[in-house]
Image (spheres, grey):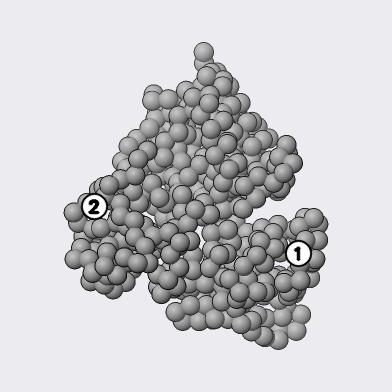
Amino acid sequence: MDTDLIILGGGPAGLAAGMYAARARVRTILLEKGAAGGQMNSTEVVENYPGFVDPIYGAELSQRMESHARKFNLQILYEEVSGVRHAGQGFSVETESGETHRCKALILATGCQPARLGIPGEIELAGKGVSYCAVCDGPFYSDVEVAVIGGGDSAVEEAVYLTRFASKVHIVHRRDEFRAVKEIQEKAFAEPKIQMHLSEVPVQVKGTAEVQGLRLRSVKDGSESELPIAGVFFFVGLRPNTKPFKGLVKTDSAGFVLTDENMCCSVPGVFAAGDVRAKTLRQIATAVGDGALAAYSAQHYVERDR
Amino acid sequence: MGESPNLLTVTDADFEQQILGSDAPVLVDFWAAWCGPCRAVAPVVEELADEYAGRVKIAKLNVENNKQTPTKYGVRSIPTLMLFKDGQVVDRIVGTVPKGRIKELLDKVG
């Protein structure tokens, strides 16, 4: 066996799990496909992680969590996982570069990525005005109008962020009220550059070489209208990153990994933590808690025969 | 980790000469410091610069300091990887994708 534990994913859940496992002296490898920090890297500032009274940059919190895990000698490999399967009493994890790592236990902490809404023009104009990351692409929209789709924390918070660049930010939301926490909503309602379009759904992103408009339909009376925007940012939920281990463990109908309260999955030796789990609140704070608990459960699993 | 000598840094000023006038196909990584996903793509691009040395030129362009080129090519999301051959755009990839997907693109031209 190459190692005791392999953690898939280096976001807050994976890094917390890695830190706990490393401190417990469980032989652990963490595999991360891109940059440590996961979705924290796509967040400008984090305002709700306890202890950071002054907002901390998402990218900085990512680096700090990575350094913290490395301090306890967590081994982090920057490799994309291509497949995971049962192998004897444990598991084998294959990477894109063709390497295979074997382990006794696994923690799935692969997180999520933004969901696509699936309206005409969305895929065709991706990168040409359709975006899923305001922090990445906001600066391309100086002094033009943009739209944000969604009504959760991400949508409303990113809409406020985009007012730094855009001349006007339209928030389009299918319900008649937002789901975002009140503190974020208050900021949006106080921002003169933001215009709300409640009970409206986007039906088409318009444009050929680049985005030129967004067609909306009223949920109440079916009437249609068009916004003359140069960019549209979708924050309509998340889809779990489960492709490399599809079929390994039970998931809910949306593909989120099912666990018990100790982060144990349907297969002994497999644990899950963070946004990839079926859960009600996907936050850095909850991811970190999941990670610590998953590491603890995994530690007891690998040490059970000793 | 030092930067690969095979990874070219291009600007608005030398884009025409380095990219459009290149005999070899060129992959350009449009990036910025504020972009987290760009940090995820950067090491992959660097590895590709070494792996494809002599076949495909690999370059990066910082969109914060070089605004003309991304505007000219309609780059509105980063990271964007754009593949040029004989001065023309032949393909583009937006966002973070597995290394294998970028290699598929490069293998078609290089």
- Provide the secondary structure element on which disc 1 rests: helix
Q: Looking at the image, which residue is at 39% across and 60% down?
A: B61
Q: Looking at the image, which residue is at 49% across and 68% down?
A: B76
- The residue that disc 2 covers is B52
The image shows residue A187 at horizontal and vertical percentages of 77, 61
Label 2 marks a residue whose chain is B
- In depth, the one of A126 and A60 nearer the eye is A60
- In depth, the one of A51 and A281 nearer the eye is A51
User: Residue A94, labelled with which disc?
Assistant: none
Dot 2 alpha-carbon crowd within 10 angstroms: few under 14, some 14 to 19, many 20 or more: some
Residue, far top? A306
Q: Is residue A230 above or below residue A241?
A: below
Task: Please indicate whether residue B5 sits to the left or right of residue B38 in the image.
Answer: left
The image shows residue A32 at horizontal and vertical percentages of 46, 41
Q: Looking at the image, which residue is at 65% across and 45% down?
A: A56
The image shows residue A154 at horizontal and vertical percentages of 66, 58
- In depth, the one of B67 and A263 nearer the eye is B67
The image shows residue A86 at horizontal and vertical percentages of 42, 35
Q: Looking at the image, which residue is at 80% across and 66% down?
A: A190
Q: Quadrant of residue B3?
A: top left
- Provide the secondary structure element on which disc 2 rests: loop
- Disc 2 residue type (three-letter): Tyr
Residue, far front? B13
Q: CA distance from mark 1 to mark 2?
A: 48 Å
Q: Quadrant of residue B74?
A: bottom left
- The residue that disc 1 covers is A188
Residue A258 in view, yes or no:
no
Label 1 marks a residue whose chain is A
- Disc 1 residue type (three-letter): Ala
